Image: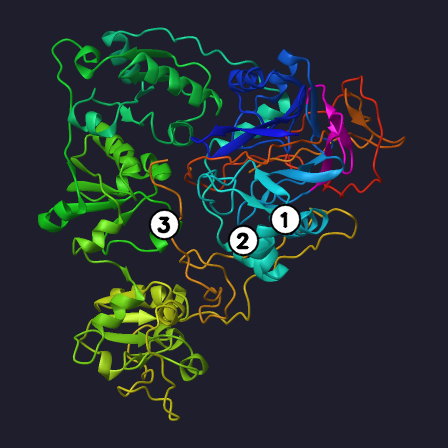
């Protein structure tokens, strides 16, 4: 009987796995703090014989190389990964014996990276578990945009093919155990923490398995979120070979050293709870709660390589923070101190403080002298935000402080943690701040004006006799196919050409609606710029019909029930739009035939499907010359506020693999371990958040840093299944 133990890394939204039988075990995608993995193996009483990577990771520093060194295990890495250390390269179809009756079979699943490989743990020749890394996740797949922009479209199609390969070749009851998807920004979507799944369940629910390839690719690319800046440094570290970690307590700094480091422009980070920080802290320090997504957000915001000093309430809090930070390459704090601000401020100084508040407090405050700052990501804001608020995502805040108007700044996010970080940054810059420590859902309940409202709210506000009017900005044929009773019709295309509002909508609050939310948001913004009181409906007519609200056909004349029809031009400069596009941007480059999905051709970059402004996929013709509405309105990020590409490396084609327990046939180029799992195991991990494009430096065509592959470790006995390795993109990328 096999077993699988899950190694949770909730701060990064990832999972590693220890799997094996009675005597031997394999470790899949281990975290950098390998003492946890060694302890798990000791509890099981098994020897770690193999350490396996599904891909070269770009969101954390791997512990694989160090774990293999410490335990003497064979280190299995996809053959296409160009790395600078000795390893056993693994090719599609390679089988690695773990112990009698238990083996690991490699399955090429490019998409997240060109060289990505999944591993099926087979018991008595039948797959019981598949470790899918960043390929098939729970309900979604890994991001295809973390390697190189020119490869994104082709990798997205490869993700589709890889998901279908797994669904086709593995039994329905095979348990799917991904590395990403529990809050990691490597995931194209988010799984609920603790969720488990099987191939059969994914076949009926995973977006890659229920959509056609073109729709899947368009939706996937349109929904991609920001990429944490530190990702640019993880791939090269992992390709070069990470060193061991040092978790011994850092050197203690006194109050004078803390002041000196602040004066030198270094980062001094207060790890305490955000409530304690607001009540009192050393001026100039930044608040990143140790209990939140410390590693992701600190590594994202701090300039890479800048010295970091940590202030903690207790030694235990400091030790936990150190462990989190080594996972993202922040190896040793410059100094540290524990205790309270009274012990950290210089003699004669007093701690600073700022108030915390709720959205109800903001509503009671009124707008005079108040600046509302939204530090959520673009995808979150597109799903709803406060009217008149300033939007600067947290990871851009320090470079855009000058854009914030004068006045007291009320900082909010989705739940409070990022607002506290933002408030500490503004406080350090000398601004008067209030940290809104509240869930964003409370904003509307507090009566604050929203820039986007729900279909139900729109229906209530536009009932017969109500002051507001529902303005349908879709094109004529869409309107005639069905619209909300009482709505007036004014296509966005005509409004952008200088068209006047229908008479029935003049001098009244306007609630714009389209199919799924993109055009209506553009219309609301345009009308607001003209001086109208305008908002739009989140999710459009799709949300309207899902809510069971009434729909009727338009009159044959095209006039709506209130005398609609877009209006005549008005004097003044016309606002024009480009030509319509019949579909979202094309993504080219289908996978090559063969047993495994392929990624080819890096010389011509496919057009990237643009995200609808609301974060939804581009699938509907639009009138702005860019892209259309999406099949469904994008929801918020799905990642808890208080919690967050990957670089492929192309390997030398002639590697031959050897290593304990790895079997292969003559002529094979690599071998790969297969893995095992106990049916009763149910991994759990809290979901987490997602990051800023443009941080990944030039790499090799496969996403590597250019390190040369070396000869594999020796000692493997080779037997192989029929060669079915998927082709990997080998085109050179600009240096």
Return the residue at label 3. Answer: 380
Q: Earlier in the sequence, mark 3 or mark 2?
A: 2
Is the C-beta separation of discs 3 and 2 under 8 Å? Answer: no
Q: Which residues are magenta?
A: 84-108
Q: Is residue 362 left or right of residue 621?
A: left
From mark 2 to mark 1, how far is it between C-alphas? 10 Å
Q: Earlier in the sequence, mark 1 or mark 3?
A: 1
List the residue tagged with mark 1.
Answer: 159
Residue lying at the far right of the rendered structure? 666
Query: Residue, x 45% and y 72% (percent of image)?
Result: 623
User: Residue 700, how many percent across, how many down?
Assistant: 66, 35
* Whether residue 642 is situated above or below residue 709 in the rendered picture: below
Q: Quadrant of residue 454?
A: bottom left
Q: Few, some or many C-alpha atoms within 10 Å of disc 3 (few <14, some 14-19, many ≥20)? A: many
Name the foreground residue: 162 vs 506: 162
| Contact (Cβ within 8 Å) of mark 2 with mark 1 | yes
- Which of the two labelled residues, at mark 2 and mark 1, occupies the earlier sequence position? 1
Count neighbours of disc 2 (C-alpha within 10 A) and say few if under 14, some if 14 to 19, many if 20 or more: many
Does 334 appear above or below 31? above
Q: Magenta stretch: dominant SS?
A: strand
For disc 1, the neighbor class at 10 Å (few under 14, some 14 to 19, many from 20) is many
């Amino acid at each position: 009987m096999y077993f699988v133990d899950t190694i949770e890394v909730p701060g990064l939204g990832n999972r590693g796995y220890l799997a094996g039988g009675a005597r031997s075990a394999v470790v899949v995608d281990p975290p950098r703090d390998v003492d946890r993995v060694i302890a798990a193996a000791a509890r099981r009483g098994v020897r770690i014989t193999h350490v396996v990577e599904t891909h070269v990771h770009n969101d954390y520093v791997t512990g694989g190389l160090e774990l293999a060194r410490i335990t003497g295990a064979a280190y299995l890495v996809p053959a296409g990964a160009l790395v600078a250390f000795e390893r056993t390269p693994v090719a599609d179809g390679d089988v690695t014996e773990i112990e009698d009756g238990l083996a690991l079979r490699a399955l090429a699943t490019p998409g997240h990276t060109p060289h990505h490989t999944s591993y099926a743990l087979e018991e008595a020749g039948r797959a019981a578990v598949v470790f899918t890394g960043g390929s098939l996740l729970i309900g979604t797949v890994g991001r295809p945009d973390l390697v190189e922009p020119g490869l994104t479209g082709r990798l997205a199609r490869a993700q589709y093919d890889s998901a279908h390969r797994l669904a086709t070749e593995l039994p329905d009851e095979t348990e799917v155990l991904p590395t990403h998807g529990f809050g990691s920004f490597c995931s194209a979507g988010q799984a609920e923490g603790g969720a488990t799944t099987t191939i059969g369940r994914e076949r009926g629910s995973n977006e890659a398995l229920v959509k056609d390839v073109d729709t899947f690719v368009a939706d996937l690319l349109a929904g991609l979120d920001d990429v944490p800046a530190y990702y640019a440094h993880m791939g090269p570290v992992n390709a070069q070979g990470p060193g061991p970690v040092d978790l011994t307590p850092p050197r203690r700094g006194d109050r004078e050293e803390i002041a000196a480091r602040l004066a030198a422009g270094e980062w001094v980070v207060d790890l305490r709870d955000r409530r304690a920080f607001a009540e009192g802290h050393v001026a100039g320090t930044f608040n990143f709660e140790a209990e939140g997504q410390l590693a992701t957000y600190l590594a994202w915001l701090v300039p890479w390589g800048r010295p970091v000093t940590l202030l903690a309430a207790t030694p235990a809090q400091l030790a936990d923070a150190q462990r989190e930070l080594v996972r993202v390459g922040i190896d040793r704090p410059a100094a540290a101190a524990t205790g309270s601000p009274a012990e950290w401020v210089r003699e004669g100084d007093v701690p600073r403080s700022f108030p915390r508040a709720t959205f109800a407090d903001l509503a009671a405050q009124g707008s005079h002298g108040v600046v509302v700052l939204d530090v959520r990501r673009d995808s979150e804001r597109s799903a709803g935000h406060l009217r008149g608020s300033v939007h600067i995502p947290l990871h851009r805040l320090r470079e855009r402080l000058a854009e914030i108007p004068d006045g007291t700044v009320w900082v909010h996010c989705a739940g409070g943690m990022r607002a506290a970080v933002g408030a500490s940054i503004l406080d350090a810059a000398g601004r008067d701040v209030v940290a809104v420590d509240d869930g964003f859902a409370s904003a509307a309940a507090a009566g604050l004006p929203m820039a986007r409202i729900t279909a139900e709210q729109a229906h209530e506000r536009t009932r017969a006799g109500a002051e507001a009017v529902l303005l349908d900005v879709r094109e004529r044929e869409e309107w005639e196919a069905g619209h909300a009773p009482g709505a007036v019709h004014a296509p966005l295309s005509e409004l952008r050409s200088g068209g006047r509002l229908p008479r029935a909508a003049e001098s009244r609050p306007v609630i714009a609606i389209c199919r799924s939310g993109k055009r209506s948001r553009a219309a609301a913004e345009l009308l607001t710029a003209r001086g109208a009181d305008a908002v739009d409906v989140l999710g459009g007519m799709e949300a309207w019909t899902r809510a069971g609200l009434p729909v009727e056909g338009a009159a044959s004349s095209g006039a709506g029930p209130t005398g609609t029809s877009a209006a005549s031009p008005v004097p003044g400069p016309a606002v024009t739009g480009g030509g319509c596009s019949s579909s979202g941007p094309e993504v080219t480059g289908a996978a090559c035939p063969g047993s495994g999905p392929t990624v080819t051709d890096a010389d011509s970059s496919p057009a990237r499907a643009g995200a609808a402004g609301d974060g939804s996929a581009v699938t509907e013709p639009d009138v702005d010359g860019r892209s259309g509405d999406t099949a469904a309105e994008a929801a918020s990020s799905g990642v808890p506020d208080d919690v967050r590409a990957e670089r492929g490396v192309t390997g030398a084609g002639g590697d031959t693999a050897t290593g304990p327990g790895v079997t292969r046939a003559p002529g094979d180029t690599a071998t790969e371990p297969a893995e095992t799992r106990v049916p009763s195991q149910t991994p759990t991990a809290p979901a987490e958040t997602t990051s800023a494009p443009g941080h990944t430096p030039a790499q090799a065509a496969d996403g590597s840093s250019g390190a040369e592959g070396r000869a594999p470790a020796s000692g493997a006995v080779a037997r192989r299944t029929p060669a079915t390795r998927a082709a990997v993109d080998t085109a050179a990328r600009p240096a």
